[in-house]
Structure formats: structure tokens, C-alpha cells
């Protein structure tokens, strides 16, 4: 069975699949640990008709009922492929030396080794910003790298 994984920058991951009967279902896994079970319209697989937020405890119970050991094994294999990488969200605070400046001015990748992969502004995700992207105060910068690299980007964006 094919499971589609979609990165949702600044939010988390979405995993979707189609049942044998043709229904599309999925789970949105937020960085915070929150999970949302989604069911799509049977006539329009791009339209969500039901969204069920789950607490961590409810997610655990549902996983156990559906056979978590099998899924956990597959996720462990996937995690090993990306071992050591983390994603962080860093807010450009008012007064940051980079508020109003270009992403290229940070030289973040050269200086830290981490990559800025998206910026969330006014609840809109701006994926793969170019060096001429201009930061604004309250932008949330999505950074991928090692824990040390991402901490270094946070320090850079706060203090220059």
C-alpha cells in the first residue's frame, strides 16, 4: 500500500493513503505532537470532509488498536535515514538585526551549516525562500539541520 507523505513547513507532516474501497484518509502530525485524523470526500480526494483532532493519549490508543508495532518499525527505518537532522521554528522578533533585511544577508547556511527551508508569515507558508527574500518582524523561520546548526541560526537571527 502506498502512503503519501507531505511536508507541511511550519506545521509538521501529513500522511495519506487510499483504502481498497477507494476512500482517502490521513493523519496530520504537528511538530507540537498534536495529531489530526482527516477523511477526504469520496468524490473529491483533495477536499477534507472530516477533521478529528486527537490528544496524545487518543492518538496512542488509536495506534494500538490499528497495529502500532508495524507502523513504528517502518518509521524507525525512515528516521534512521534522517538521523541527526531536526527542524526548528525561529521567530524574527521586533528588534532583530534581520527584521527588514534580506535572507541572503544572514549567510545562514555558510555560517551555520543549517538550511532555511520556509518562512511562515501571517499563517501563509512561503517555501524555499530565495536570498532576496526580505524578513519581517514576527516571521517564523523554518530551519533544518543538526541540533547545533539550528541553535546557531537562532542565535544569528537574534543577535546578528
Image (cartoon, helix red, strand yellow):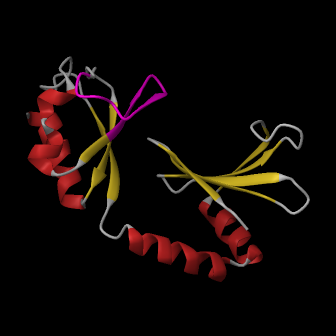
- Residue drawn at (9%, 35%) of the image: 159
Q: Which percent across, then down, holds residue 38?
A: 74, 48
Q: Quadrant of the N terminus?
A: bottom right
Residue at left offset 12%, top offset 36%: 107
Q: Start and end of the magenta stretch?
A: 117-132
Question: Is residue 47 positioned above or below 36 on the image?
Answer: above
* Between 127 and 124, the one nearer to me in the picture: 127
Direction from residue 154 to residue 63 in the image, left or right: right
The answer to whether residue 26 is left or right of residue 82 is right
- In this view, 41 is above or below 79: above
Image spot of residue 116 (x, y percent) = 28, 41
- Image side of residue 53 versus residue 134, left or right: right
Tell me residue 122's x, y (percent). 45, 22
Magenta stretch encompasses residue 31: no
Q: Quadrant of residue 72?
A: bottom right
Residue drawn at the location 25% of the way across and 30% of the way down = 92
Q: From the viewer's perspective, is residue 135 above or below residue 58?
A: above
Image-quadrant location for residue 143: top left
How many callouts does the rendering have? 0
Return the residue nearer the eye: 36 or 19.
19
Front residue of 145 and 156: 145
Work out which quarter of the rendered image holds the C terminus and state it.
top left
Give the answer, above or below, for where 81 lies relative to 86.
below
Q: Quadrant of residue 80?
A: bottom left
Residue under the image location 49 percent in, 44 percent down: 11
Spot occupied by residue 20 in the image (x, y as percentages of width and height): 87, 63
Query: Is residue 124 a member of the stretch shown in magenta?
Result: yes
Amino acid at each position: 500500500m502506498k502512503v503519501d507523505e507531505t511536508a507541511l513547513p511550519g506545521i509538521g507532516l501529513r500522511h495519506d493513503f487510499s483504502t481498497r474501497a477507494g476512500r482517502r484518509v490521513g493523519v496530520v502530525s504537528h511538530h507540537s505532537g498534536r495529531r489530526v485524523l482527516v477523511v477526504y470526500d469520496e468524490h473529491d480526494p483533495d477536499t477534507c470532509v472530516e477533521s478529528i483532532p486527537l490528544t496524545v493519549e487518543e492518538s496512542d490508543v488509536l495506534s494500538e488498536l490499528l497495529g502500532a508495532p508495524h507502523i513504528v518499525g517502518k518509521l524507525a527505518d525512515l528516521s534512521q535515514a534522517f538521523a541527526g537532522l531536526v527542524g526548528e521554528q525561529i521567530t524574527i522578533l521586533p528588534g532583530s538585526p534581520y527584521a527588514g533585511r534580506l535572507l541572503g544577508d544572514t549567510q545562514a547556511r555558510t555560517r551555520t551549516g543549517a538550511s532555511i527551508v520556509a518562512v511562515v508569515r501571517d499563517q501563509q507558508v512561503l517555501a524555499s525562500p530565495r536570498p532576496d527574500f526580505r524578513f519581517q518582524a514576527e516571521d517564523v523561520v523554518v530551519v533544518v539541520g543538526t541540533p547545533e546548526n539550528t541553535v546557531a541560526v537562532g542565535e544569528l537571527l537574534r543577535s546578528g
